[in-house]
Amino acid sequence: LRDGEWKLYHENGPKAGEGGYTAGRRTGPWRFWGSDRELDAARSGDYEPVDLTPGEYGVTVQGTHVDGRPMGLWTWRRADGSLRLAGEFGPDGAEGAWVAMLADGSLDAQQSGQYTAGVRTGALEGWPDQ
């Protein structure tokens, strides 16, 4: 697992990011730059891992806050460890593919889908939109 200070680089050479890891997760202040060397303010900030143990509904939540907002991959798991929900947050809310699973292991097609700025924009590719 990554631990300590890290610097990341784009394939073409410029620095892509710098910050610290603790037990494989980004922590503390991080700065990111695009390949054009411009600061990526949406991804830069103070990273704080979030681990919530099973609550009233028996769900464990894991993700990261950046400057107090959810960012990056988040997962929700049932008490038995099975996946309930997984997806990524961007600066404006849920982004990309989100997968929600029912207790029987089948896809929850009403919650799963493609998201842009926190709004569901369509079904997951390869799954019917029910």
Image (spheres, rainbow, N blue to C red):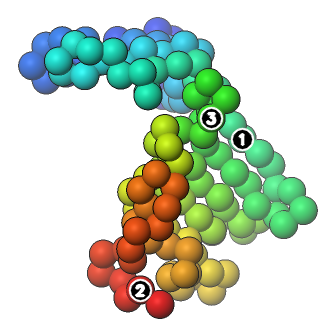
Check the image and name the residue furthest to the right: 56
* Amino acid tagged 1: Asp
Query: Compared with residue 52, is residue 123 higher up or lower down, i.e. above or below?
Result: below
Q: Earlier in the sequence, mark 3 or mark 1?
A: 1
Residue 118 seen in the figure = yes
Where disc 1 sits, the SS reads: strand
Where disc 2 sits, the SS reads: loop
Is the residue marked by circle 1 packed among few (<14), some (14-19), or many (20+) residues within 10 Å?
A: few
Residue 39 position by quadrant: top left
Q: Which mark is residue 129?
A: 2
How far apart, in angstroms, are the residues tagged by discs 1 and 2?
A: 32 Å
Q: Nearer the viewer, mark 3 or mark 1?
A: 3
Decide: marks 3, 2 in contact (CB < 8 A)? Answer: no
Q: Earlier in the sequence, mark 3 or mark 2?
A: 3
How far apart, in angstroms, are the residues tagged by discs 3 and 1?
A: 14 Å
* Amino acid tagged 2: Asp
Residue 19 horizontal side relative to residue 103, left or right: left
How far apart, in angstroms, are the residues tagged by discs 3 and 2?
A: 29 Å
